[in-house]
Image (cartoon, grey):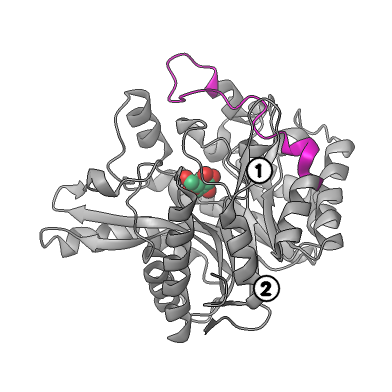
Amino acid sequence: MTRFPEGFLWGAATAAHQVEGGNVGNHYWEWEHDPHGPFAEPSGDTCDHYHRWAEDLDLLAAAGLTAYRFSLEWSRIEPEEGEISRAALDHYRRMVAGCRDRGLAPVVTLAHFTMPRWMARDGGWTGPKAGDRFARFTETVLPVVADAGYVCTVNEPNLMACMPVLAATAARGERVGGLPRPDQETAEALLELHRRARTVLRDGGAPPSGLTLVGQEFLAEDGAVEEMAAHRAAMEDQFLAAAADDDFVGLQVYSCARIGPDGPVAPPDDLRTLADMEYRPGALGAAVRRAAEVLPGTPLLITENGIATADDAQRVAYTEGALRSLHAAMADGADVRGYLHWSLLDNFEWFAGYRPTFGLVAVDRSTFRRTPKPSLAWLGRVARANALGAEA
Ligand code: BGC
């Protein structure tokens, strides 16, 4: 049997806008309704998790999992600048308590891609007021995150800084060949927001905090070793370096990046998943090894890993492969504290809408009925054994 360390967390993850439904106050909602925009469809009610979160936590806990990652929706908490919704704060406080009541460690993300519309209209993430606003928001939610296990500040600043190029590609109906290099100005602005939040969290005595980053296995194609290293430095190394003083780094790994002499190379068609990523379970271990090498001494948490597929047996096979590669990296010294699968629910996959299904649980889009897939029970058995090998 392949055992994981005692106390290793096993869970699943979501993000507010992808599951809550009705997030009319954020900039994605507005963007989703732009007829020339990149979205296949609008988010709408999504999984109605805002009202059904207790049922969803029950599913997680009953399966045997021990952690749940979710995000706070800033536009619900601060619908207009400076106007705080105490009801929304209470909602998220109840979710944190609801996790604890069920033996789940809450992993809370402060910003998972969305911002209030008022902020988007006035400078957005990179505007001059963003740092102060995010620091103030962090201060507002200190009581909510006080009892969390971990707090993630900004979700994937390295992907957010690629957004303009990704959005343009999607709006033209083109397939993504791979992640482009992030825009440097945006990257620096987002890292500054992270530092501002980290200071507020530390001063406020909050639980361990860190960034979450897209991690990939970087592969050089056609001898493009230098191009690959330069791409990796821009996409990964600079963000890892910025996380050196964090309490942990959240890694979100799905696949590999093949970099050729002219930049990212699209994966072969027969290996593409429903999210247009290459099927590559071992990418998890490779990304973890690299992060542990660049940042020795900083604990890692796998805050996302999963596959968009309509074939749940393939999800289990992918996850087992990913976990084996993770375990091997840990056996070689990587300090990893837990694994959170993306995602708990089939949800709104941003530009691609509802077609790519990442969930351990299926959701009927009209009745909101939840149907756990065999992969949920499988991951629960792994969690209960804290090992691979006994769960089949
Ligand atoms: C994001 C999620 C997204 C997932 C799958 C990550 O980049 O944090 O919001 O759904 O990847 O594409």
Placement of 47 over or under 205, stated as above or below:
above
Q: Amino acid at mark 2?
A: Arg
Question: In terms of secondary structure, where does tag 2 sit?
Answer: helix
Dot 1, how many residues are within 10 Å of its Cα: few (below 14), some (14-19), or many (20+)? few
Residue 55 among magenta residues: no
Q: Is mark 1 within 8 Å of ligand 1?
A: no
Q: Position of residue 186 (x, y in %)?
A: 45, 44
**Residue 174, above or below 36:** below
What residue is rendered at 49% in x and 64% in y?
242
User: Which percent across, then down, holds residue 201?
Assistant: 73, 61
Q: Quadrant of residue 200?
A: bottom right
Residue 326: mark in rendering: none
Q: Position of residue 165 (x, y in %)?
A: 35, 35
- Give the residue pinned by disc 2: 384
Q: Quadrant of residue 368?
A: top right
Residue that mark 1 sits on = 371
